[in-house]
Amino acid sequence: MTVAVNTTAIHLTGACGVEEVEMLLECLQKHPSLPVDLSGATAIHTALWQALMVFRPKLTEVPTSSLIGEKVILALSAYFRQNTEL
Amino acid sequence: MDELIEQFVIEARELVQQASDDLLSLEADPGNRERLESAFRAVHTLKGSVGLFDLGPMQGVLHHAEDLLSHARAGTIAVDTSLIDPLLAVVEWVDDSIDGIAQTGRLCETQERQAARLLGLVKADMTSRETDERPSSPTAIPDWASSLRQHLSPDDSHGTLVAFRYEPHPECFFNGDDPFATLTRLPDLRHMAISLKQPASSLQIFDPFRCNLIIEGISGGPLQHVEREFRLIPDQVELVVITGIVAQIDQRLAAADRQTTVMRVDPARIDALVEIAGELVTAKNGLIPLADEARGHDNAALARRIGASHQEIERLVASLYSAVTRARLIPLEQTFRRFPRLVRETSMKLAKAVDLIIEGETVEADREIVENLFEPLLHLIRNSLDHGVEADVERRQASKSTRGRILLSARQRGDRIEIEVADDGRGMDPMRIRTAAIDRGVVTEDQAALLSENEALQLVFAPGFSTASTISDLSGRGVGLDVVQRSIQRLGGTVEMNSSAGSGTSFMLKLPTSFSMSQLMVVEVGAERYGIPIADVIETQKLLGSAVQSVRAGQAFILRDRTIPLVHLADLLQVPRTAERLHADLKILIVRAAGDQIGIAVDVIAERAETLTRPLTGLLQGVPGIAGTTLLGDGRVLLVLNLEELIR
């Protein structure tokens, strides 16, 4: 399981492919208040990023192993800042 | 009219004008980035406003026009006539529809029927062109790329940068695409911004398998490497090389700053101010009789004090007046800008290639003058197009460039403006004009023989004169140059024409910049009072009735060894002459009219007044011999005469 939930967070671990997006979506819908922990993820498919963009959970711990992750997180937080009034 | 519609009509007219200006200048200068942006903004805003009303297919048409422009902005289609023609057609269609919308609040049926054709035009353009042109043309830097550039720190912006805008296909996840993974392979990714194509409407209906992203970013290049990474999805990516665009951005920001310093004021409010200032002038004149009265009561001190405050008020009123008249000044551009499109359309209809060159459009004049110049200028320009500029073949035979040239230029000369309409066409032949004038009974053969070449040319201004052998759709509408002359005179101006056969014709209009305060001499004839501009009067004379000599049907008198014809103002105005005055002393104004001095007999020369003369409007507009009206200190209206017109 690359998408998992416990009491403190939704965790993404390992290589998260496009097929994980439904699982992530379900978690986000069920636990709207939980933050998402990305620290264990080695790769995150665009579809998952998009879901995070739409649901806007609090993101904790950026992925360490993926170069792109940092840029995406930066861009995501810029997007959230710009659209906070929405 | 509905207030919302009213606002829309005002705004739509401006936007249409803006778009049409921009498109025309793009046609001449396809690389002009600012014009392209401005055209896009105009069409975009117009589409937005149209959306507020039920205007049938108009919004759809504008939407496609906007699409075309945004593709041009992105550099994916070229800016050329095949882009501009359909867009201009759309703009013209909207322009034509505005009047109907103003009246009924909706698109009229004939306009609606044209919508399909226009839609075809703008759509055809889209599909046939979608994939030509490489996106990296150096002149086209789209907005998105420019704004990306601002995210880079100055240290980061050296060398060649490649901006990309990547809109993954909605179904791309099914094709195995992972857009962000693709981006990891880009060389030197310096900045990235992501956004949603359509804002997330509801979390319930969010489809996680449809890609709804727009990803923009900047790579440190080189371009070939960036292109290689995107080679499988060229249709989803725009690439722009953005070196050295900082100056452009600065320029655009500066332009935006400038725009905000202008305040839009309803002209009616300024008119109200002018009116009040004008009334103040008249009210101020009321102080003079008051001072006289005080003097009559032997109160010289009071009279002096009234006189002093009269002068003070006079100074203030004059500066108030000049300040409000300045507020009424608008650039001639407001009228000039309407011509490029008209010339373009008309020259196409006539199958003549004509360049319209506009100069001095920043020269300012009173709003009323600028607006009323449109008709006469339109007539002159149509004349040049129709009769002046020759057909292609004829021009080549005369070894002229095949493209005709019409110059519309303005300049300021002191408190007057000069506007020239000149063409490089076939010019006018004084002989032909003479013959035509005789044929049409404008002059007799004897009269014509006496005319100099220049005088013969001026016959074109005579009522009922037109040399065009066939009546054309354009200028042969029975409106002659005499109408042009009259409307310019009504604005207080003059028209002169110069022409040389073979090399062209030029009309010179000289006009005041505004309706300034003028000195009037008030005269009485019988029981009536009239104003005569003091500028027209050379001197005033008293004359014994016996000094008047009869010369054939008329009268004349001798002044300083010159014979001067005498006319009675009463006769000119067809007011009965008072009999008992017939043999008394005559009061004469010596005026200059048609280049000669003429004596005009009046009953009484009364006071002088400083007033604001405004041109006649409405029904009175066509009355010859009346220059305008003015209010006197006692509230009476005074007709101001145009002696030159009366005498003729």
Image (cartoon, coloured by chain):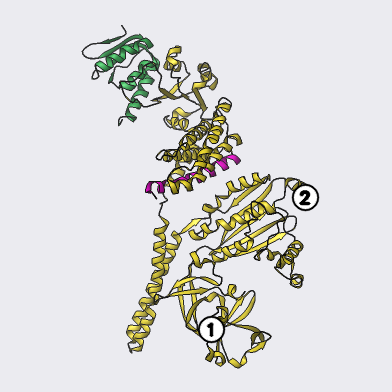
Chain colours: A green, B yellow
Q: Magenta: predominant secondary structure element?
A: helix
Q: Residues within 10 Å of mark 1 (few under 14, many from 20)?
A: few
Q: Position of residue B451 (x, y in %)?
A: 74, 70
Looking at the image, is B224 positioned above or below residue B22?
Answer: above
Q: Which mark, by number, is residue A61?
A: none
Tell me which chain the residue with mark 1 is part of.
Answer: B
Do badges 2 and 1 share one subunit? yes
Alpha carbons under labels 2 and 1: distance apart: 60 Å
| Disc 2 versus disc 1: nearer the observer | 1
Quadrant housing the C terminus of chain B: bottom right
Report which quarter residue B182 is drawn in. top left
Q: Is residue B15 magenta?
A: yes
Residue kind at label 2, given as amino acid type: Ala
Residue B559 in sight from this viewpoint: no
Residue kind at label 1, given as amino acid type: Pro
Residue at 39 percent of width and 59 percent of height? B269
Q: Is residue B121 magenta?
A: no
Q: Position of residue B231 (x, y in %)?
A: 53, 17
Nearer the N terminus, badge 2 or badge 1?
A: 2
Q: Position of residue B48 (x, y in %)?
A: 42, 38
Residue that carries the numbered disc 2 in the rendered image: B398
Q: Please, what secondary structure does the residue beneath circle 2 have? A: loop
Residue B393 in sight from this viewpoint: yes
Left or right, B307 with respect to A57, comes to right
Residue that carries the numbered disc 1 in the rendered image: B576
Q: Label 1 near label 2: C-beta < 8 Å?
A: no
Look at the image and give the residue range highlighted in magenta: B1-28
- Which residue occupies the foreground of this view, B403 or B192? B403
